[in-house]
Image (spheres, helix red, strand yellow):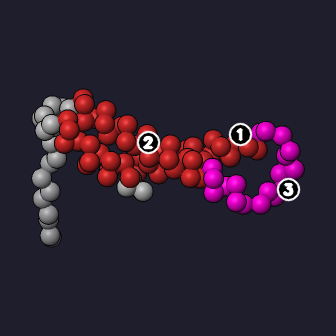
């Protein structure tokens, strides 16, 4: 059996964890805005026959959840690029437990 040992990454300190969370949140916000603008290009359907705000609220909540999931998985990669660009300004990571 082929086994590949991957070295463990150093644990991130509080500042690096905060930066990582902030970049993921920014990517989530960006994706949410992108999904909202993309949805404006799709013609309205009358399938649900809802002219109130409930359809819009549901779609906005769905877009936010989708954007949050995409950013937490790193689908777009923007958060990683921003983290890699900004992390050197914080100095080296320490070997503290997360």
**Percent position of residue 52, x then y:** 83, 40
How far apart marks 3 and 1 lie (CA) works out to: 16 Å
Give the extent of the magenta segment.
36-54
Q: What residue did someone put label 1 on?
A: 57
Instruction: Look at discs 1 and 2 and give the one toward the viewer.
Output: 2
Residues 9 and 21: in front is 21
The alpha-carbon separation of the residues under discs 3 and 2 comes to 34 Å
Of residues 6 and 19, the one nearer the viewer is 19
Label 3's element? loop
Circle 3: is it few (<14), some (14-19), or many (20+) Cα within 10 Å? few
Residue 87 in percent (x, y) is at: 23, 42
Query: Which residue lies under the disc numbered 3?
Result: 46
Residue 39 seen? yes
- Towards the viewer: 29 or 62: 29
Question: First in sequence: mark 1 or mark 2?
Answer: 2
Q: Which quadrant: the N terminus? A: bottom left
Which residue position holds label 2?
26
- Judge whether residue 46 is colored magenta: yes
How far apart, in angstroms, are the residues tagged by discs 1 and 2? 21 Å
Q: State left or right for residue 13 relative to residue 64.
A: left
Name the element at disc 2: helix
Q: Is residue 74 left or right of residue 97?
A: right
Q: Is residue 3 above or below residue 26?
A: below
In terms of sequence position, does the residue under pointer 3 or pointer 2 come before the other?
2
In the image, residue 56 sits, relative to residue 47, either above or below, namely above
Closer to the chain start, of discs 3 and 1, is 3
Q: Secondary structure at mark 1?
A: helix
Q: x%, y% of residue 91? A: 15, 37
Where, quadrant-wise, is the C terminus in this rendering? top left
Q: Residue at x 20, y 35 (%)?
A: 90
In the depicted structure, whether residue 67 falls above or below residue 16: below
Q: Residue furthest top?
A: 14
């Amino acid at each position: 059996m082929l086994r590949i040992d991957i070295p463990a990454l150093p644990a991130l300190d509080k500042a690096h964890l905060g930066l990582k969370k902030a970049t993921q949140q920014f990517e989530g916000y960006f994706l949410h805005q992108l999904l909202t603008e993309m949805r404006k290009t799709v013609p309205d359907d009358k399938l649900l026959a809802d002219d109130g705000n409930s359809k819009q609220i549901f779609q906005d909540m769905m877009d936010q959840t989708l954007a949050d999931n995409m950013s937490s998985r790193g689908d777009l990669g923007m958060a990683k690029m921003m983290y890699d660009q900004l992390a050197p300004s914080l100095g080296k990571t320490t070997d503290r437990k997360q």
